[in-house]
Image: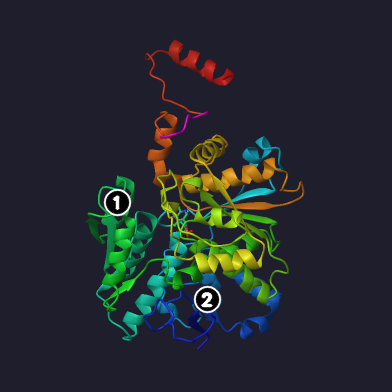
Amino acid sequence: MKSWFRDAVTGEGQWSLDEVRYRSPAGNLLEVVHDLEPLREQGPAGLKALWDQRWGPRSAHPFHSGIWGKKELVLPDIPDEHVVTLDEGHTSLLPLGRYAEDLGCDGQQLLLKQCGNSHSGSFKDLGMTVLVSQVNHLIRSGKQEFLGVACASSGDTSAALAAYCAAAGIPAVVLLPDAKVSPAQLVQPLANNALTLALDTDFDGCMRLVRQLTEDGKLYLANSMNSLRIEGQKTVAIEIIQQLGWEIPDWIFISGGNLGNTAALYKGLEELMELRVITRMPKIVCCQAAAADPLFQCYQRGWKDFQAVTAQPTQASAIRIGDPVSVPKALKGLMRHDGEVEHASESELAEACARADRCGFFACPHTGVTLAALEKYIARGRIGANQRAVVISTAHGLKFTQVKHDYHSSNLDGVTPQQPNRPQRLAATIEAIYDAVQRHHHG
Ligand SMILES: *Cc1c(COP(=O)(O)O)cnc(C)c1O
């Protein structure tokens, strides 16, 4: 056995990954542990060469995927034929270019990791390929039977779950709060033929029900307390460094809701340290919407006394979470490695999106939160002239067109847009168009 579960808080226990288990007997979250010794023997140069050689579309199944290209650090024991992949990962790491220059920085030193350019449009694919592969393995090898895989979600998790389950031919069950999700968020699980249940409750209500629903083990639980997802998500840390030619960025900005992704980033970096692939840790800044910022408030108190809050409405709907499940895991990494937390108001995140979009990006509101945090750090002189900072973009902007539409039509609650752009109604004449072009050129 090369990998197993243990209690993520006490570090105790050892359970097979083939067990259906989400928490320790003490009620704590689990984490996956790998025996890194064989990999350490390969040495950093050997690992980098292996991972570089697998990068790209010509690798065999399943190594063409950005996640499964690092299989020995993800799920080493799963047979290749049980892996369910939609070629996730290996997303671009783009220089922020003109956007960075407008902030007075080097356009090549600030970069955007486009995790939303993935199969279902968000980074949730990175974890879901691992979770669904493991379920597929349990079913195909005859170790377990399930009625299906279930999650509570208001968007990206259900989209990813529905897609991977459909690819594997495993039934997906999605619990959504009725009338609280947009058509765009509803259409992905519907199209992928998930059993989509709109319930007369809120997200927290759906979460309580899905826990009950999965208790007897007939349905497998896909929410982020499931530590298998972290194993896929952590590869973003490896990818960023690999894309920088194995150089270590000075800063990584990441948005935080349930805080699984922040915990995953630290897990990836810590394993790279253990394998000596990197020799120092980047500084992580976890970025929250001010409307739902319990971690920011805890950071302000010197990491003392974490308290859940009631999350208020925010454009960044995927991080509208007041009582994050993965707080113990994220806090461990942040405290151990001097991480920091920043937050952004609705105006700040909307304007950061608009500024980035005007430079050729199409940032989702969660990416707006991280960009707004980056802007604050630059304004305070925290990012040195020779330093490199990476901002993690978590979803594709096209999933959140309603927010952009509302911004540009001055329809966002509490936001007076500084950079709106409206379609102009014109007479269908060359003169009128030419006139408009002239005005746009000068404006
Ligand atoms: C899920 C999600 C997040 C938050 O990730 P956590 O692991 O819950 O902190 C951020 N952005 C998008 C687009 C998401 O879907």
Q: Quadrant of the C terminus?
A: top right
- In this view of the protein, can residue 169 be seen by the observer? no
Answer above or below: position of 265 versus 27: above
Q: Residue at x 69, y 71 (%)?
A: 277
Q: Residue at x 33, y 86 (%)?
A: 143
Q: Residue at x 56, y 57 (%)?
A: 298
Q: x, y percentage for residue 412?
A: 41, 34
**Residue 150 colored in magenta in the image:** no
Disc 1 crowd, CA 10 A, few/some/many (<14, 14-19, 20+): many
- Foreground residue among 290 and 218: 290
Q: Which residues are magenta?
A: 413-418
The part of the image, by quadrant, that contains residue 27 is: bottom left
Q: x, y percentage for residue 130?
A: 44, 71
**Residue 415 colored in magenta in the image:** yes
Label 2 near label 1: C-beta < 8 Å? no
* Amino acid type at image mark 2: Val
Magenta stretch, main secondary structure, is: loop
Toward the bottom, the furthest residue is: 1
Q: Mark 1 sits on what residue?
A: 186
Q: Mark 2 sits on what residue?
A: 9
Answer above or below: position of 404 versus 316: above
* Amino acid type at image mark 1: Leu
- In this view of the protein, can residue 397 be seen by the observer? yes
Q: In the structure shown, which secondary structural element does the residue marked by tag 1 occupy?
A: helix
Q: x, y percentage for residue 416?
A: 47, 29
